[in-house]
Image (cartoon, grey):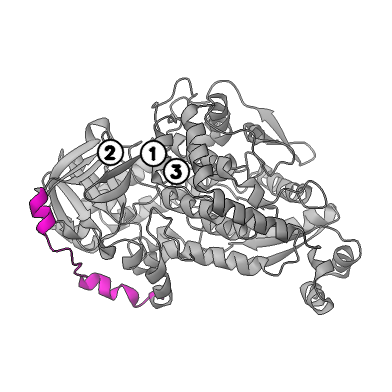
Amino acid sequence: MNKTLLDVTARIRARSAASRERYLDLIDRMSGRQRGVQRLGCANVAHAVAAMPANDKLRIVAEKAPHLGIVTAYNDMLSAHQPYEGYPALIRDEVHRQGATAQVAGGVPAMCDGVTQGTPGMELSLFSRDTIAMGTAVALSHDVFDAALLLGICDKIVPGLLIGALHFGHLPCVFVPAGPMSSGLSNNDKAKVRELYAQGKVGRDELLKAESQAYHGAGTCTFYGTANSNQMLLEAMGLHVPGAAFVHPHDGLRESLTREAVSQALRITAQRDYTPIGRMVDERTIVNAMVALLATGGSTNHLIHWVAVARSAGILIDWSDFSDLSGVVPLLARVYPNGSADVNQFQAAGGPGFVIRELLGAGLMHGDVLTSVAGQGLSAFARLPRRTEDGRVAWDELPADSGDDAVVRTAAAPFSPTGGLKLLSGNLGRAVIKVSAVPEDRHTIEAPARIFDSQEAMQAAFKAGELERDVVVVVRFQGPQANGMPELHKLTPPLAVLQGKGFKVALVTDGRMSGASGKVPAAIHVSPEALAGGPLAQLRDGDLVRVCANTGELTALVDPAVWAARDMAVITPAAVADNGAGMGRELFAGMRRNVTTAEEGAISWL
């Protein structure tokens, strides 16, 4: 096993000892109770089964058969979640085949960041994660279930479901994905049209045509953003059916994988091989997820989300842990925006199973963890699923070599010897930068700052030609307290245009840049945020700023005496003052007041 991996794991275990002990004690107390239908009063049980068929009532009450709760994020606004419409019926059919029962315990909200990008609705996005976690808790609070199936894929939905499930850590849980859409217009071609539109060289009709060719059917978007990073991390945590992440929604194998998820959930109930999710997700599992993120150049959003996920299991991690692991974890995948391939090509080249196998072989993952595959460790997830003649699932060993070494490589011949994420720190605070897609000659940018208090102001300056020079664009007052920390993905095309013209360009922000962070160096999630008195509020137009992924610097090159003399009072711009009104934002005021910093997971429930 790699020494750094072991050291980071031990450090996390020691840091988390007290909180993890409290968490496990709660699991043990909850696990020691009688099953729900035996424990609850007769009126409670009658309410729980009132609408169920008579045979199901008999199975639950008299035969004491396992009973599964389904928590679904279905809606048909999200292309990725549209296939879930028919899943409850499919799951019920399979549980009946196996002599068990299932109910939809509840639904949780699921918003599409692609729809809300650049709009006020995006300011609800980050907080939707904790709302989903609370919705999951409401669903599971019926407390009659022996295990849970969690139906969700996209950006905040999976972290929210996982946080909620971990607060019911005594329950066995299996996540059920639905797969990516088929490949459409390539991500590179889509990006080119966006850049042309930003320059005014093509119109709205051409842009809409390109976007519609890229996003065109059921399934997840095919770039390697937060949604698909979610699926990679769940595989690395052993919470899926092995290899379920990236099979197309309409492939026959997808139905077989969903049926197998039912089988796995039933196998790990207390009646059989009891494996509660709170025991499955320990410090080793969290480290495995962190390693998988780094090895695939995954979404920067997970430097926020997985801090919150870990905290839900009594485990305390921070960005230094990510940074130390990044120094030893090789980059094994290049999927857009870190390359030209999409997730379908990633899957064809070997997919998550190939990456997990290589990391296990290199001593960069803990293999001896509990997983949803009863009695098997993480090696069960280093195989490729296939559909058998009778419609079930079998697994094959992966080939020794990558199916396409432009997309996936072995640990012996990686794209880079280190991971794709770096920690930055200096007199501007702490931040993260995703460098796996950034050209090496752009890893260090030193240029005068141009400061904006909203993304709309930055876009207006770009259109007016005010940024045609070497520049560090600073977009502040975008943190969790200020406005819910929206993704600023709409800034990518103009910044890419400036970089394409040969200017040295970087972004510094206390907001997010999404899982689609690409070729422009971006110091994001700056903590503490400007509204909380962070040093971004002290920065002035023209200050020389250094962003260096090589040395880990995020520094305003201002004379220390001048810097110290600047007014520390935060002057809240009008744009921030207006953030609390309209589009339902009033309902999230309590979250904005109570949220922790980005590095602490932007948690609203502590």
Asked if residue 175 shows in the view, the reply is no
Asked if residue 400 is positioned above or below residue 88 in the image, the reply reads above
Q: Pointer 3: residues within 10 angstroms few (<14), some, or many (20+)? A: many
Left or right side of 182 for 298? left
Which span of residues is magenta-colored?
560-585
Q: Position of residue 466 (x, y in %)?
A: 10, 54
Left or right side of 476 for 37? right
Q: Position of residue 140 (x, y in %)?
A: 67, 65
Q: Disc 1 on helix, strand or loop?
A: helix
Left or right side of 481 for 475? left
Q: Verify CB contact (< 8 Å) between mark 2 and mark 1.
A: yes
Whether the magenta-drawn stretch holds residue 579 is answered as yes
- Depth check: give the residue in front, 283 or 20: 20
Q: Which mark is residue 224?
A: 3
Name the N-terminal-most of marks 2 and 1. Answer: 1
Q: Residue at x 83, y 52 (%)?
A: 271
- Read off the residue under disc 1: 323
How far apart, in angstroms, are the residues tagged by discs 2 and 1? 10 Å
- Read off the residue under disc 2: 552
Q: Nearer the viewer, mark 1 or mark 3?
A: 1
How far apart, in angstroms, are the residues tagged by discs 1 and 3? 21 Å
Q: Disc 2 on helix, strand or loop?
A: loop
